[in-house]
Image (tube, coloured by chain):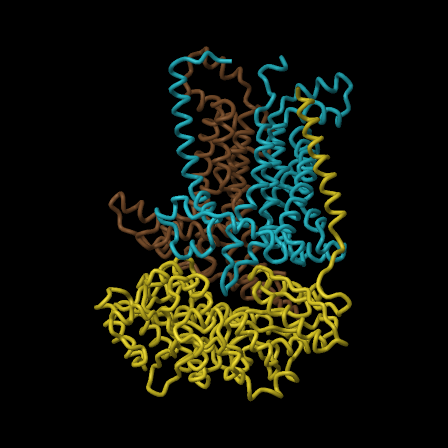
Chain colours: A yellow, B cyan, C brown
């Protein structure tokens, strides 16, 4: 009886082993892609980026038949890709040729001696056609390391269904004061909030302080999280929620939560201020709002203030472990800086490309899934062109990931949801906490 | 066995009732997931989980079928890698850990306490601390991006050793002595006498180590370098990004991913009906 | 590593500085959360699976398989998706399922995920219970197989009822298994990361989901401060060793436990 069991167990195990060996033995040593080119290894944390790079690689091979490349692109989970890259750069082996580094993590790689290749020779010749502030985020000591995917311009997405019910014309909203007044109308007519404010992320707060020329850190990396502008801005968010009652905490805590998508999709709030790249969240997760959303510049704080801000982003770099650094740089510049690359960034990914000279290109006004979704969709770029020069650069330093963290888990929650601290108290505490670490 | 009286029937019925209710409550989120997997990914975002969405309608197998064609059939590779790693890692580590655990539980020898403490210590060390040295080791052994690179560090598994030790402690020593008197070698005793007694423990460990391996995330991630070599958890995680998620593939992928491990569970839970009949040895 | 400052391309010895920096409010929050979580998981996840395992063991055959499977399936689910499902179940709208349920009993809809510390801890323990009950049942079932039937039979002859049998025979004889399960609950509780990650992938309200391992992650990787991350890791190690070895000493683990 026992023997039967034991025997069967071993039989099963050895059978499984044999099976596995045959699979393992059969499944190794394969490669893919274009044969005969130089292999370029690329890491990203965003699978949709892969398609972009692959299309650009195809174009590259048509254009430079004598410098063929074979792109091996892999999408890793976000956190882990960055962690792995850190480990690989620190141990000097195992890093890819080209890699996407997200903005919040980028400063980590600028500590000490950056292990990336400088891209100045590619960027500087066309600087006047680029949104410069977006390149400075990924720079240190005058060297440009990362090439951005987009400008990430802040815009306002209005739900016209709700605005029309309340008789509000979005084109009359110039300043935040106008916005608050419109919000009161919306609230009175429909009972719905004008907007939602994140309590576990930073997307409601960071763009607004950037509109006013402030930031988490200044250009020298000094922490200015608790300056007066920031306190005042946080107070404004608080007032929208608790004084004017035109805003509610974002369902789910932040604008990328499943819960928020459902809420907004069902006409939960009248508007949301988010960067340009947020537009594919609407197309992908809020299909019921098709034909109801209007994109307009964001309100400003003062009559001459900036209406936009550049938010989020990803800097693509060539690492110093690349086998053929020149080739990797050339290809990356081709993908990210060329006109055809920038046009593809819009067509494929729905980004506002960093080379603004293509914004006027007819290709950006052709119909696609994004233009079909939004009201006057083919004129979206006319709206962004209006605010192109109203974007302050965002300053990055090694402390920024920490600051974002404190904003996410303490500041916004304590002030807006819990109301346990005033904006001043919360920001001063948070700033001191981060200062203590650096 | 026992005479089934009226009273024990009522008790038996009540027991089944309690367990069924508990089971249904536990299965509820799973049910929500299964429904979501058979609908377009957008649906979940549009409506959330409400009473209305729990009525099974508007289902289609489209996502499940699309799973194997999306991203050049990457999912098929992930599934294969996960299965290969699970089988190898479980087979090897359960066997080796059983040896060690049995030794620690059955024999008195000098330094046993120290050895036991060492096992516990290793159990406690968070893998995050070991990652860097392990990573360098795997690179120098040229095992990066191979199945063996994922398996090797886990061939001896402190957690399983501890479990087998706890189990072996309760084994009747009389068997050991009886075996020795009959002139069976120590190894023979293990395989022919003790192992059958430890079948429930083997069953439990096979299930749990498989599960560990199936859901293991951190280490395979570091070893595996190309999309074709990913395991399922890594692949699924790469669908989630700060800039939007691929819910279609995520939900159906997660659903399909539970199937193999359920099979393992069903196969090995039979071992819990152990052959430990009463009084097989009269002291 | 915990005595170094590690930045890409450079490593510097900085002595005990990393340990000095440990003494900050976030670290203490993390330790407090981890200990609280460990406490509750032990309180819930030892007795409940034990009783369920005893019940499962008492019913024969096919039914038992099915029920076991039902309880075990949650453990098989991938963390990522569980997160999505749970976040939607506990969504703050009054239509979301849990709030509908609360509404039935006359309660107010709650913003579960944003509601500070006790609710956060409640959710964390709830998810832990959901995920780990089935696994602990497997341990207890294999332990129950060890108990000879004739003990029960002779107890029955002596007129013992089911409750007496449970306390007189089952629980004492399950001791090795219970010790094992408690020990792994201690390790698991202190090293918890996933449950918190399931609910709050980014910040958790007022750090209510911050655990020690999350803190290691936050400092070591998100802020690329591996030296400091290692220092937190070492601190965690000491904490776990302290708690678990105390526990094992108390239970007389290092003495031969012959039944």
Q: Is residue A220 above or below residue A42?
A: below
| Residue A321 image-quadrant placement | bottom right
Which quarter of the rendered picture does the N terminus of chain A lie within? top right
Q: Is residue B178 above or below residue A349?
A: above
Residue at 57% over, 52% down: B67
Horizontal placement of B166 versus A13: left or right? left
Q: Is residue A95 above or below residue B88?
A: below
Residue A152, image x, y percentages: 48, 75
Q: Nearer the viewer, residue C181 or A107?
A: A107
Horizontal placement of C106 versus A155: left or right? left
Which residue is most to the front? Answer: A367
Horizontal placement of B112 versus C62: left or right? right
| Residue B88 image-quadrant placement | top right
Residue B221, image x, y percentages: 63, 55
Residue at 73% over, 47% down: A24
For the question of whether residue C193 can be seen, the reply is: no
Horizontal placement of A171 versus A218: left or right? left
Residue at 49% over, 27% down: C64
Q: Nearer the viewer, residue C45 or A165?
A: A165
Q: Is residue C250 above or below residue B146?
A: above
């Amino acid at each position: 009886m026992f023997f039967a069991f034991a025997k069967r167990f071993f039989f099963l195990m050895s059978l499984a082993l044999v099976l596995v060996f045959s699979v393992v033995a059969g499944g190794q040593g394969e490669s893919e892609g274009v044969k005969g080119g130089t292999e370029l290894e690329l890491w990203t944390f965003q699978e949709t980026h892969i398609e972009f790079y692959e299309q650009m690689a195809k174009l590259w091979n048509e254009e430079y038949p004598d410098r063929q490349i074979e792109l091996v692109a892999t999408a890793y989970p976000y956190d882990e890709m960055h962690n792995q890259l850190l480990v690989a750069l620190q141990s000097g082996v195992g890093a890819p040729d080209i890699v996407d580094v997200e903005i919040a993590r980028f400063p980590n790689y600028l500590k000490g001696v950056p292990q990336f290749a400088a891209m100045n020779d590619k960027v500087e010749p066309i600087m006047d056609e680029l949104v410069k502030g977006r390149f400075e985020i990924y720079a240190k000591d005058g060297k440009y390391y990362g090439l951005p995917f987009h400008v990430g311009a802040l815009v306002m997405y209005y739900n016209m269904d709700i605005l029309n019910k309340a008789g509000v014309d979005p084109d009359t909203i110039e300043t935040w004061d106008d916005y608050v007044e419109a919000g009161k109308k919306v609230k009175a007519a429909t009972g719905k909030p004008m907007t939602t404010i994140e309590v576990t992320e930073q997307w409601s707060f960071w763009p607004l302080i950037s509109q006013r020329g402030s930031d988490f850190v200044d250009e020298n990396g000094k922490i200015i999280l608790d300056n007066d502008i920031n306190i005042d801005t946080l107070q404004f968010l608080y007032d929208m929620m608790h004084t004017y009652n035109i805003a509610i905490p974002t369902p789910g805590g932040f604008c990328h939560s499943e819960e928020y998508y459902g809420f907004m999709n069902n006409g939960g709030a009248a508007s949301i201020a988010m960067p340009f790249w947020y537009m594919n969240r609407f197309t992908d997760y809020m299909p019921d709002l098709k034909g109801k959303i209007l994109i307009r510049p964001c309100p400003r704080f003062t009559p001459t203030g900036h209406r936009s801000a550049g938010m989020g982003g990803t800097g693509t770099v060539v690492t110093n472990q690349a086998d053929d650094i020149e080739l990797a740089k050339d290809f990356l510049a081709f993908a990210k800086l060329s006109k055809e690359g920038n046009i593809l960034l819009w067509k494929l990914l729905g980004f506002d490309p960093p080379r603004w000279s293509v914004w006027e290109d007819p290709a950006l006004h052709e119909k696609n899934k994004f233009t079909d979704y939004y009201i006057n969709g083919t004129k979206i770029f006319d709206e962004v062109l209006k605010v192109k020069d109203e974007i302050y650069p965002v300053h990055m330093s090694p402390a920024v990931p920490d600051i974002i963290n404190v904003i996410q888990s303490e500041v916004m929650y304590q002030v807006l949801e819990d109301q346990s601290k005033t904006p001043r108290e919360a920001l001063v505490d948070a700033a001191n906490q981060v200062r203590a670490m650096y | 066995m026992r005479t089934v009286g009226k009273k024990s029937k009522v008790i038996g019925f009540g027991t089944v009732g309690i367990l069924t209710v508990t089971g249904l409550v536990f299965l509820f989120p799973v049910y929500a997931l299964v429904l979501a997997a058979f609908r377009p990914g957008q649906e979940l975002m549009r409506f959330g989980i409400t009473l209305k969405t729990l009525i099974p309608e508007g289902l289609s197998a489209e996502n499940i079928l699309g799973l194997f064609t999306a991203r050049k059939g990457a999912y098929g590779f992930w599934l294969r890698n996960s299965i290969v790693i699970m089988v190898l890692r479980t087979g090897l580590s359960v066997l080796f850990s059983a040896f060690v655990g049995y030794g620690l539980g059955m024999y008195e020898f000098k330094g046993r306490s120290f050895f036991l403490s060492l096992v516990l210590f290793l159990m406690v060390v968070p893998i995050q601390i070991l990652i860097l040295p392990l990573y360098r080791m795997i690179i120098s052994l040229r095992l990066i991006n191979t199945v063996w690179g994922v398996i090797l560090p886990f061939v001896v598994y402190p957690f399983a050793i501890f479990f087998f030790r706890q189990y072996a402690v309760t084994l009747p020593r009389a068997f050991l002595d009886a075996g020795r008197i009959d002139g069976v070698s120590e190894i023979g005793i293990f395989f022919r006498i003790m192992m059958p007694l430890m079948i429930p423990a083997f069953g439990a460990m096979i299930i749990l180590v498989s599960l560990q391996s199936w859901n293991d995330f951190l280490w395979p991630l570091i070893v595996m370098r190309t999309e074709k070599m990913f395991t399922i958890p890594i692949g699924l995680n790469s669908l989630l990004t700060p800039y939007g998620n691929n819910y279609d593939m995520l939900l159906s992928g997660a659903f399909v991913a539970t199937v193999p491990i359920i099979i393992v569970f069903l196969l090995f839970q039979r071992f819990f009906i152990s052959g430990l009949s009463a009084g097989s040895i009269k002291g | 590593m915990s005595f170094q400052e590690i930045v890409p391309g450079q490593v510097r010895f900085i002595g005990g500085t990393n340990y000095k920096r440990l003494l900050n409010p976030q670290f203490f929050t993390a330790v407090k959360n981890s200990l609280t979580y460990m406490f509750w998981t032990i309180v819930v996840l030892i007795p409940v699976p034990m009783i369920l395992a005893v019940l499962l063991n008492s019913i024969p055959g096919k039914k038992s398989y099915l029920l076991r499977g039902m309880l075990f399936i949650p453990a098989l689910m991938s963390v990522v998706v569980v997160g999505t499902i749970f976040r939607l179940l506990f969504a703050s709208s009054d239509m979301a399922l849990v709030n509908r349920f609360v509404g039935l009993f006359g309660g107010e809809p709650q913003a579960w995920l944003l509601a500070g510390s006790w609710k956060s801890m409640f959710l964390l323990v709830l998810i832990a219970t959901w995920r780990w009950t089935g696994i602990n049942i497997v341990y207890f079932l294999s332990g129950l197989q060890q108990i000879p039937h004739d003990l029960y039979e002779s107890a029955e002859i002596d007129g013992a009822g089911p409750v007496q049998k449970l306390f007189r025979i089952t629980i004492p004889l399950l001791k090795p298994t219970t010790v094992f399960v408690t020990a792994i609950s201690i390790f698991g509780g202190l090293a918890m990361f996933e449950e918190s990650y399931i609910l709050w992938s980014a910040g958790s309200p007022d750090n209510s989901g911050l655990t020690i391992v999350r803190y290691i992650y936050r400092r070591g990787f998100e802020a690329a401060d591996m030296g400091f991350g290692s220092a937190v890791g070492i601190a965690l190690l000491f904490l776990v060793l302290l708690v678990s070895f105390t526990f094992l000493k108390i239970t007389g683990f290092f003495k031969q436990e012959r039944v």
